[in-house]
């Protein structure tokens, strides 16, 4: 691959370019790849970071500036930090969860984890995990994902008072509309109440209409014999009020083992997920987690964690992230047969081009060598051109001497060709 077609940079750095003396994880990236949000416990990325815990930061790749966003309206950092951000397409809004009690006035549930959104234009923070009347959640809420325009936020919660009649005693998926202030249950049963099992790992389409998530519930869709005793992947259509199972066999049956949602395309047509199931596609004989894409229009499922020659991986592939048009899917994999010379015996980051049926290693340095440490999760930009990922490798960029996991962005300039 010509070097001019690939670039990699470290973004978990301070505004002066200094590396952090702490670990960074959980990246997300804006639609054009300019802004990267991430979690870090490094105390030196911004001045006066003295809470000794994880915080949420945004790095601007154009201006090379880094700011902390897990702060209250006065600019004070959260007293218990923040974690796992999700950033809107234009980089203005950042959703995250936090146990901090000082991010908004009158945080009614103390140090229970809540979901917040920070507006980088107005420098304001609002709480998201509340009932439609503004009541504080009576239990913890986690793992938000924000819609492209920043209006809708989906998240999982153990709270039972966010919507009326939530008596299942399980984790559920909710959606909060920041314009109307309303909260609705997403992981509803076919009868309309809360599902009969835990639901989690939610992702939202660009306009907020479709939400994909994982669930142990067996009563979400009528007519499905859900007997695998595991997580399955569903899509909820908020406009029509319908739920469909997407982790299915070619015959439409539920997969025989666990499946976990990991992304959805802009229009909701394509759903990325990873699964241990061996019956979602023909000739799946590796008995490990694979990454799949389900086409809701055609009703078909394809495996994307494969080598460019179609060979399946011999080790787990996880955490798929999908571009807006559904063409590109990034994922983590321990497989050694997806790229030549992959001998680090660790998770690496790959991108699969569904149009060209090619798989490319991303967690590598400019000499083409695979990183010397494990890489974690990835997030692909809406346009499919930039991929943010976490990695403990020390040789992806020059001068990486902190010995911690960092956040990187790989850019492949011919991905859109």
Image (spheres, rainbow, N blue to C red):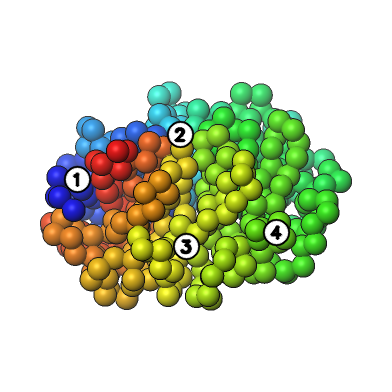
| Lower sequence index among marks 3 and 4 | 4
Residue tagged 4: 251
Q: Compared with residue 360, is residue 313 higher up or lower down, i.e. above or below?
A: below
| Lower sequence index among marks 3 and 2 | 2
Label 2 vs label 1: CA separation?
Answer: 27 Å
Tag 2 secondary structure: loop
- Please name the residue shown 35% across and 57% down the image: 359
Between residue 35 and residue 269, name the one nearer to us. Answer: 269
- Please name the residue shown 38% across and 71% down the image: 335
Q: Is residue 397 visible?
A: no
Between residue 13 and residue 369, name the one nearer to us. Answer: 369
Badge 1: few (under 14), some or many (20 or more) residues near its Cα, within 10 Å? few
Label 3 vs label 2: CA separation?
Answer: 23 Å
Q: Compared with residue 374, is residue 150 higher up or lower down, i.e. above or below?
A: above
Residue tagged 1: 5
Q: Is residue 287 visible?
A: yes
């Amino acid at each position: 691959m010509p070097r001019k077609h690939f670039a990699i940079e470290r973004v978990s750095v301070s505004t002066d370019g200094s590396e952090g003396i702490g670990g960074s994880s959980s990246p997300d990236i804006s639609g054009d790849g300019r802004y990267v949000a991430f979690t870090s416990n490094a105390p030196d990325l911004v001045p006066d970071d003295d809470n000794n815990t994880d915080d949420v930061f945004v790095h601007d790749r154009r201006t090379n500036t880094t700011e902390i966003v897990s702060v209250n309206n006065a600019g004070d950092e959260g007293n218990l930090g923040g974690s796992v951000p999700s950033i809107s397409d234009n980089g203005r809004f950042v959703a995250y969860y936090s146990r901090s009690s000082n991010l908004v006035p009158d945080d009614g549930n103390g140090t229970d984890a809540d979901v917040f959104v920070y507006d980088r234009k107005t420098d304001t923070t609002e709480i998201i995990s509340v009932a439609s009347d503004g009541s504080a959640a009576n239990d913890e809420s986690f793992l938000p994902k924000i819609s492209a325009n920043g209006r809708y936020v989906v998240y999982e919660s153990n709270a039972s008072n966010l919507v009326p009649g939530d008596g299942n005693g399980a984790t559920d998926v909710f959606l909060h509309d920041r314009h109307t202030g309303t909260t609705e249950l997403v992981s509803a049963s076919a009868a309309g109440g809360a599902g009969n099992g835990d639901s989690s790992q939610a992702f939202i389409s660009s306009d907020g209409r479709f939400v994909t998530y994982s669930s142990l519930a067996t009563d979400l869709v009528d007519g499905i014999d859900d007997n695998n005793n595991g997580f399955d992947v569903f899509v909820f259509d908020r406009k029509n009020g319908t739920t469909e199972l997407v982790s299915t066999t070619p015959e439409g049956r539920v997969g025989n083992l666990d499946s976990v949602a990991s992304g959805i395309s802009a229009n909701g047509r394509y759903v990325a997920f990873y699964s241990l199931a061996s019956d979602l596609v023909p000739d799946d004989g590796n008995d490990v987690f694979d990454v799949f894409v389900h086409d809701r229009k055609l009703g078909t499922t394809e495996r994307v964690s494969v080598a460019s020659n179609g060979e399946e991986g011999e080790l787990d592939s996880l955490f798929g992230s999908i571009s807006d048009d559904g063409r590109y899917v990034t994922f983590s994999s321990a497989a050694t047969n997806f790229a030549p010379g992959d001998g680090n015996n660790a998770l690496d980051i790959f991108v699969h081009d569904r149009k060209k049926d090619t798989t490319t290693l991303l967690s590598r340095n400019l000499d083409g060598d695979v990183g010397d440490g494990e890489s974690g999760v990835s997030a692909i930009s809406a346009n499919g051109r930039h991929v943010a990922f976490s990695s403990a490798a020390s040789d992806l960029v020059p001068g990486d001497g902190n010995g911690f996991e960092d956040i990187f962005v790989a850019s492949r300039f011919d991905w859109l060709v």
